[in-house]
Image (spheres, rainbow, N blue to C red):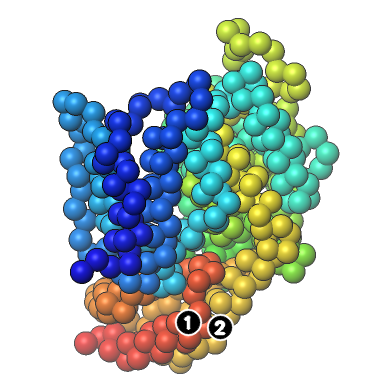
Amino acid sequence: MVSDRDSFLHGPARSSLEASEPLAPFASPDGLDPQLQMFLQEACSQLCAWFGTANQRSPLPSLRLLPDAFPETEGLGAQHLLDDLQQVMDGAYQPSHPGALAHLDPPPNTASIAAELICAGLNNNLLAEELSPSLSQLERQLCGWFASCLDLPMGSGGVAASGGTLSNLTALVTARHSQGLNAVSDAVVLTSEDAHVSLAKACRVMGLHADALRRIPVDANGCLRLDALQEELNGLASEQRPCLAIVATAGTTVRGAIDPLRAIATLAKTHGTWLHVDGAIGAVFALSGQTRELVAGLGEADSITVNPQKLLGIAKTSSLLLVRDASTLHAAFRTGLPYMEPASVGAHGGEMGLQGSRPAEILKLWLGLRQLGMVGINSLLVKAVARRERLQQCLDVQALDLLSGPLHLLTCVPKNADSNASERWSARLRQGLLDEQIMVSRPQYRGRHHIKVVLGNPHTSDALIDHLGMRINQSSGRSSH
């Protein structure tokens, strides 16, 4: 018996592909290539079927059978390639499932999916303007728009990067250059103890001393303590060690806490040091008038990382580094591109960050935002916070320790559960929820395993949230068993 899904995937197009000439490895420049068109249509049909059947399996597949990872002696035909693709898709994580609540990976925005295809087909390179004439201009304009929305002044701008880790590294390299610390290996970066691990990577890559990253304690709400930051700054002055940057976090990874941005900015100015805000999770909330106060003070930073991929659903990767003064990027990364024609405006993209060759990922962000509009963006942000508030109201605060900031993340653990009990509880609950097609994560935080729920999935219903809350409450009484 042939299912509707099989019929959809392997209907007339499959027969046409099997009977046709082999798929050419490169599209013809002389006219429409019907084989390529048919191949792309069939691949898109498989993808749409994958989306449309998300509810029929768990967000995390239990079985992952992959085709051979290496090329055959002879190239494969179109249908074999499609079959290989299907096998990979069947074993892939499914962010479109309503129960996908474990991580900061929402379903992809549909316009950005189309833009990804066009991006691949254009194969433009944002290294230099002549290799991406319209897209280089689009990147400059969109970075300028984001900077304005985040209250950075005129003259600000930025560059797209492949993920927040690279954006954070680019920010610290820029800060180091701007403060004349390129040859100073004992410079220090100050951040909270809950800051992202990418900052440790950045310090290693930059060749700083092993103790370069100083982690400041956080308060009961997970926010960087200003008194401890002031004390550390005073200590550095007495040690005569320069502070390369203070890194505040707008949305910590485990609980979504937001550091006191305005107060930290005041300290940074007083001590004459660079302020970078890792807003990979939270900075997008500045795009809505209803949520922008949650991240008040972003505009006082010297640089900001923002990742539209984490909540707006822009297909990966989509990260921006925004800087208060766009010229600081060029100053830090200018090398000269003597094999390229000069840029018509500003600098080439390859001289604005660490990456040289870059795909036109800005196209996904641009088209995705155009599809959403400001009304759609506002709806995504407001509803994500509302889902977190709903789950929080469901949970038993007498039985659970709840950790959350004002965004869309919530983390919990049974009260008085020690390390061993919390590990058993979280593993048992996570597996039980997976059996019900609900996927949560269980990060280690302050010596205990927690259950973490990310409420950024627009497909998640109130009924699912209520059920999840009930299951967490039920499990909390068995934490020590």
Q: Residue at x 28, y 68 (%)?
A: 3
Label 2: few (<14), some or many (≥20) within 10 Å?
Answer: some
Q: Position of residue 472 (x, y in %)?
A: 38, 84
Residue sitting at the far right: 154
Q: Position of residue 439 (x, y in %)?
A: 36, 70
Mark 2 and mark 1 residues within 8 Å of each other at the beta carbon: yes
Instruction: Give the residue number, with chain letter if any, for mark 2.
Output: 390
Q: Residue at x 73, y 27 (%)?
A: 327
Q: Nearer the viewer, residue 34 or 168?
A: 34
Residue sitting at the far top: 338
Q: Position of residue 53 (x, y in %)?
A: 37, 67
Q: Residue at x 35, y 26 (%)?
A: 25
Of marks 2 and 1, which one's residue comes earlier in the chain?
A: 2
Cα separation, mark 2 vs mark 1, equals 7 Å
The disc placed on residue 382 is none
Q: Nearer the viewer, residue 344 or 14?
A: 14
Picture quarter containing residue 220?
Answer: bottom right
Instruction: Give the residue number, with chain letter if any, for mark 1.
Output: 465
The amino acid type, in three-letter code, at marker 2 is Arg
State the quadrant of the N terminus.
bottom left
State the quadrant of the C terminus.
bottom left
The answer, for residue 94, to whether it is visible in the render is: yes
- Location of residue 2 with respect to 460 vertically, above or below: above
Q: Nearer the viewer, residue 115 or 11?
A: 11
Picture quarter containing residue 263?
Answer: bottom right
The amino acid type, in three-letter code, at marker 1 is Ile
Q: Secondary structure at mark 1?
A: helix
Q: Secondary structure at mark 2?
A: helix
Picture quarter containing residue 24?
Answer: top left
